[in-house]
Amino acid sequence: MASRRPISVGLMGLGVVGGGVARALADKASAIEAFVGAPVRLTAALVAHPRRRRSDVPEGVRITGDPGHILDDPQVDIVVEVIGGEEPAFGHIQRALHNGKHVVTANKEVMAKHGPEVLAHAAEHGVSVGFEGSVGGGIPIIGPLLRELAANEISAVNAIINGTTNYMLTRMASDGIEYADALAEAQRLGYTEADPASDVDGVDAAYKLAILSSLAFHTTVRDTDVYREGIGSLAPADFAYAAELGYAVKLVAIAKRVGDEIQVRVHPAFLPAAHPLAKVDGVYNAVELEGDLVDWAMLQGPGAGARPTASAVVGDIMSIAQAVAAGAPPKPPPALDRGLRVQPMADLETKYYLRLRAVDRPGVMAQITRVLGDLHVSLASVIQKEVVDAAGTAEIVITTHTARESAVQDAVRELAALDVVIEVSNLVRVEDGRS
Amino acid sequence: MASRRPISVGLMGLGVVGGGVARALADKASAIEAFVGAPVRLTAALVAHPRRRRSDVPEGVRITGDPGHILDDPQVDIVVEVIGGEEPAFGHIQRALHNGKHVVTANKEVMAKHGPEVLAHAAEHGVSVGFEGSVGGGIPIIGPLLRELAANEISAVNAIINGTTNYMLTRMASDGIEYADALAEAQRLGYTEADPASDVDGVDAAYKLAILSSLAFHTTVRDTDVYREGIGSLAPADFAYAAELGYAVKLVAIAKRVGDEIQVRVHPAFLPAAHPLAKVDGVYNAVELEGDLVDWAMLQGPGAGARPTASAVVGDIMSIAQAVAAGAPPKPPPALDRGLRVQPMADLETKYYLRLRAVDRPGVMAQITRVLGDLHVSLASVIQKEVVDAAGTAEIVITTHTARESAVQDAVRELAALDVVIEVSNLVRVEDGRS
């Protein structure tokens, strides 16, 4: 049923990513046609201000402020959603699918919150959804999980999937600057939204981890299932101690299978300097996978930006357009039927780094270690630097052997309640891959 | 046209990889069925000694020594070729395609020598060829080039794609051992064939680079188009100087677009210690890609072995079986119609490291540098260590700025002919990504 009929693309959103997609479709029209076997044409674009003159869209593209002009246009084959955010994007996607249109989206929030419904809705209407651009910008990761690595039972996905925080942490590690200064710099460079909370609080990474872990474990994982801790508590002292102990500090997104449960968590972590993710610096992203056949694989690249995201989005458009041109049925949606439970965070077993300030007098260390010992939290190392201020307080840094999260949290509470402890300054998980 | 009819796989070859594929198909039958939408059954296996008892193949699989029992069996849907080598594998593949069977192969030699014919033959008969396992073991790389990264104009592919030599070079770098000892160790560990020439002479890497560059540049690149130099000339001294100068020594496979030409070359190279490939050690492989949209991406993992290769092969089987079950037409073959010419090696412009032994007397350095200067080869650094032996010879190490390969080769000939030069010990290209 192959045909050379042009395939029509309607673009919802002409911001940074949308502009990149429009440019790529125009600039690469002949290469795309050669790949697809039919011309692919951008025919309409939804914008917030349709009357504004635009130089970034080719002649003949209908610029509209009315979503219905794309979603209900029977000529449109593929709807590309690059508005971002939950609504109205989710509504647009569902309406497009209902109208029998294929959808390509880079929307991590919609896929993290409603991915299973979107995929089921697409299957019901016999159309495809491409969402390669929703995780890791231009890094091929969704496709490999669904195809090249599909034979594997995945046991772990460890990732750095937020470029903004990775840039900030890289700066804090290499130049010893404060969190607030790193954030201001990231904002100045345009790496964050006006409200940076989604990046620094780990919300963005949690969306992406929900998507990756759903596919890796064939189980519906929502963003709300992901334990989430941001980078705001990290101070220059933590980076200094990490370096002293041989670790890098990263915001990690970890999905790990433990028996019939899965861990899904986003938080700062100390990684051994030799860990593959420890060397991923700046705005780059990386996803490390462990599978029973492949053993280990890591995929790296730019995690965001107009062109890298357009790389993924246009790749999805090309694959879907090729199938449309060939008259191929859509692929079955990924099975999300394993029903693995999310492990409660209290049951996590890992290692920990604890920094606290205490009164500097005899017997204090004994009190602190007794609290930990009573809770079966075993010490791996203790650093006590000389008195750090006029008040005569000492900074104490403890790393633990593998311990239970609930016990460590209890210990933190008990330590904070000790008269001799002035403050528990930070608690960071240590992920060294050994138990 | 979806059906639940079982999909029949015929396996040609039950060696290390074939055994891994058979085991994975058996162990993962239910997960594969859930993915494909129909059962996938190994029904026959071609072996060299069909009378030998085998414990690694499930009941009900026909073990045969006659290729026709698979290639001409109308029940077989997918032929999996994991025999390796050019013939009889190539003949089997073509016969399978001619008989309307889909083919999955991990055969780099066949795909490097005859890939375009195989892909065209498959298209002619309306079937698919999967060859993810032919490059980089379990690393997803063929699929991403054909799908997720398809929107990119690829400008460079830089890879470490031979695990045996990477293991040897890692050992030579970290422990200062001789080439012969590293080779003996790799052989003892089972990392090489009985005849290690395919690994150490760069033949294996050249096959894989021909495949990658064909897909990256949409141009037919044969193994014979790839410039090839092995690792046999590398001595402990080269590793010591490399470390002193801040470089790692790797066998690189480089495919680079330069205007309307492409460079395709496999040879040892000095890479800056901070280069992403410099940190890829041991038997691991990595492929670094540069594209106009994605900018940069790197894919890493185990480059060989039964299970990693089975990961790729079974992934291909699953994708093809899924399409068969859904009644989908095969994808169009990758277009190889750009017709980019391979740049003659003499035209290469890069940097060089030159190690030579000369008589240690006044004026020698002037003679050597005059040869280079006359050929417009500009020096970046010169190291002369004290006299190294009783004969009073000195070891001189020169690195150059970007120079033309033909000029450097002329210089090496002229230097070797100088009375004062005892030997040109080694010439290694320096790939620092800057010009």
Image (cartoon, coloured by chain):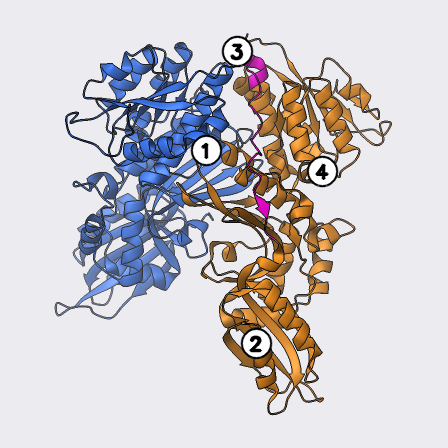
Chain colours: A orange, B blue
Q: Is residue A267 left or right of residue B281?
A: right
Residue B28 lies in the magenta stretch:
no
Q: Residue at x 29, y 31 (%)?
A: B18
Residue A378 placed where, x, y %? 51, 73
Label 2 close to label 1 by CB (< 8 Å) = no
* Displayed quadrant of residue B72: top left
Residue A185 vertical placement versus B39 (above, below)? below
Residue A376 vertical placement versus A298 (above, below)? below
Mark drawn on residue B1: 3
Q: Mark 2 is on which residue type?
A: Asp
Q: Mark 1 is on which residue type?
A: Glu
Instruction: Give the class, few, some or many, for how many residues have Cα within 10 Å of label 4's Cα (few <14, many ≥20).
Output: some
**Structural distance between the alpha carbons of marks 1 and 4:** 30 Å
Q: Which residues are magenta?
A: A323-343
* Viewer-closest of B102 and A192: B102
**Structural distance between the alpha carbons of marks 2 and 1:** 48 Å
Q: Earlier in the sequence, mark 1 or mark 4?
A: 4
- Name the residue beneath numbered marker 2: A374
